Amino acid sequence: MHNHQCQLAASIICGNPLNLEADLSALEKGGIDYIHFDVMDGVFVPRFGLFPEYLKAIRSKTSLPIEVHMMVQDPEPYIQDFVNAGATMLTPHIEPLMHVHRTIMKIKSAGVQAGLALNPGTSLSSLDSVLEDLDLVMLMAINPGIVGHKLIPRTMKKISELRKKIDEIGKDIVIEIDGGVTPGSGIEMVKAGANMLVCGTGTIFQPPARLEDKIAEFRSTLI
């Protein structure tokens, strides 16, 4: 995954649960790079999200890489379930983790890639001891668990600061942005150093418009 090319991840929780197979097929045809799979426990965030059986059903219909965004208070007991269900990468939030390094190592030893997600108010310095062990850092540009919230303005500065940290250690770690991604903000995020954007209702999930058309339209704004 190269810094100059921005990958698009489709937030599958925004898809049509009664017609998910059609959505997956349209996402593949549209050339989406990743599936973003939101897990919420009702504790770390105020709502509920998706679960391993749902992931298994998605995995049975697509070979696209799937990132599991774990908005949960205690991710460790669920690592194996999501790996068994077909995850490519697990990205828990750093805030509730007592032993960040241990959690990352557990994810990696389960045979998948490891990311970490940071809330808007969480400082980048929290990554200092573990950054080089990560495949991806996800910066939340809105408060997690709330759909359609407005972008938090400090996000761009945080992206460029993180890009600098990653470049300094010379590793190919993906910077992913979740929340507040629109055709207007996406290009700014990429300019600041992001190379994966989570696409939801602000970009591609806008029925009755076709997913393929919306993906093409959004990509064209990033060039």
Image (cartoon, grey):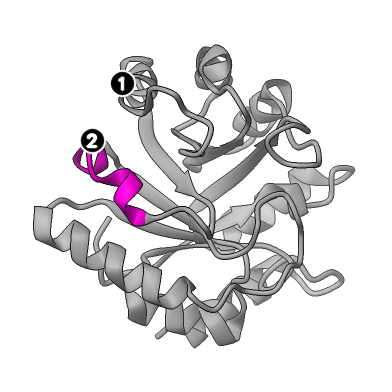
Q: Across the whole image, how many numbered discs are drawn on residues?
A: 2
Q: Amino acid at mark 1?
A: Met
Residue 106 vertical placement versus 199 (above, below):
above
Answer left or right for 18 relative to 39. Answer: right
**Do we see residue 80 in this rendering?**
yes
In front of the other: 164 or 18 = 164
Report the disc number at residue 105: 1
Quadrant of the drawing holding the C terminus: bottom left
Q: Amino acid at mark 2?
A: Asp
User: How far across and how far down the image is residue 76, in percent?
Assistant: 51, 17
| Residue 148 location, quadrant | bottom right
Residues shaded magenta? 124-132
User: How far across and how far down the image is residue 95, in percent?
Assistant: 50, 39
Residue picked out by circle 2: 133
User: How far across and how far down the image is residue 29, in percent?
Assistant: 59, 59
**Whole-Å distance between the Cαs marked 2 and 1?**
8 Å
Q: Report the residue at 56% width, 65% height from top.
A: 141
Let me know if residue 125 is in the magenta part. yes
The answer to the question of whether label 2 and label 1 lie on touching residues, with beta carbons closer than 8 A, is yes
Kind of element beneath mark 2? helix
Q: Report the residue at 26% width, 72% height from top.
A: 4
Report the disc number at residue 45: none
Which one is earlier in the sequence, the residue at label 2 or at label 1?
1
